[in-house]
Amino acid sequence: MTIQILVPVLGESIAEATVSKWLKSVGDAVARDEPVVELETDKVTLEVPAASAGTLDEIVAREGDNVEVGALLGTIGDGTPAAGRPAKATATPGGEADSGPRLSPAVRRLVEEKGLDPAAIPATGKNGRLTKGDVLAHLKNREAAAEPEPPPPAPAAAPRADDAREERVPMTRLRRRIAERLKEAQNTAAMLTTFNEIDMTNVMAARERYRGEFEERHGCRLGFMSFFVKACVVALRELPAVNAEIDGNDLVYKNHYDIGVAVGTEQGLVVPVLRDADRLAFAEIEKTIADFGARARDGKLTMDDLSGGTFTITNGGIYGSMMSTPILNPPQSGILGMHRIDRRPVAVGDAVEIRPMMYVALSYDHRIVDGREAVTFLVRVKQCVEDPERILLAL
């Protein structure tokens, strides 16, 4: 019996993926639910597991191929005969089989097309089974034996100094999709950015004061992101246009606060979503963000993790950015950019003091968010971060 490996449902509005990597080779044994192939979609890399234990008999879709939902990727043979047919005896290394070697459909088709005698091909599969890899190796050896000895290669020319100045590699599907969405945002939205700066003194003092107790009780570190998530929720409640989106001729105001947190990976930027961030405690936010980061690096994020955000926060400060103008994450109408913390002189009352300061930026869609609302939003975020007790007291 042959089990097909099919492209699973990839998520809402995604109909195609790219085969990025086969985790098994033809002839390899696979366990039930063991990942056999990786697919890359516009948003995530996902693993396709084996529906049954057996042997990988055939790879239909090669690495780099584009495949649609439901397409055949490969086949797994489970070693059992089809219903109603007696099993054929398995060929053994030491002699002929009682009724010929047992062949998978893929192997049988290949030997018939090439006019080969299966019994004459060394078998390396489990229990002496003949695999497609065995047949291909046999054909390669036969062709090599029939070809004349090639002439010795000419001496290689000395490499030029500029041979390695360029390298051309195809864009991954994720990188292509990121490029498309960023350009879409620029082409569609009336995008503007407004700036402010935040004195991080009180937040840094609170983190230092409660760091040990927080980590001991909750099992996670107390970062800056939870403060900014909570501050943004306060501001979004007061300025609902920043949490809204345009749908045709309608404005859709969201009464929930699903905050996307941008995470950089080697494959590109992804934005997993904190669901109902207004209902999450600081520790829940920190744990969820840490989990997102780990799963993003391992390629384990799901489509559900990345869908449905209403507002986004991106922190270029972890890479050393002093200031930037973040690009909207369509169809959202606002994105907050955090940056690095620098100690610089600021006026405090009538004195000049050295304070840890961060520039923040809000990019917004001017079609739905007015300048007054954008500036007010950043002021509210600034107030909440500079005086974190406002978050707890809902002030």
Image (cartoon, rainbow, N blue to C red):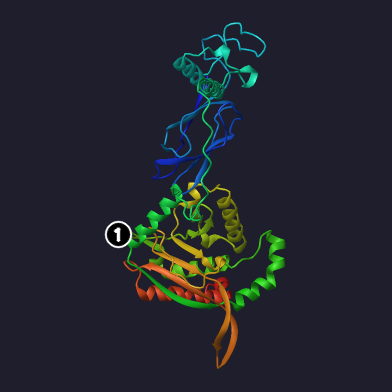
Between residues 58 and 50, which one lies in front from this camera angle? 58
Query: Farthest bottom residue?
Result: 350
Q: Is residue 340 above or below residue 144?
A: below
Between residues 3 and 237, which one lies in front from this camera angle? 3
Q: Amino acid at mark 1?
A: Asp
At 41% from the left edge and 64% from the top edge, which residue is drawn?
327
Q: Is residue 131 above or below residue 175?
A: above
At 68% from the left edge and 72% from the top edge, which residue is drawn?
208
Q: Secondary structure at mark 1?
A: strand
Q: Position of residue 47 (x, y in %)?
A: 53, 40
Q: Is residue 303 left or right of residue 387?
A: left
Judge the density around disc 1: few (<14), some (14-19), many (≥20) Cα neighbours within 10 Å.
few
Q: Position of residue 18 (x, y in %)?
A: 45, 41
Residue under label 1 = 250
Q: Position of residue 40 (x, y in %)?
A: 48, 44
At 39% from the left edge and 67% from the top edge, which residue is drawn?
364
Between residues 284 and 29, which one lies in front from this camera angle? 29
Between residues 214 and 353, which one lies in front from this camera angle? 353
Quarter assignment of residue 225: bottom right
At 60% from the left edge and 59% from the top edge, which residue is drawn?
284
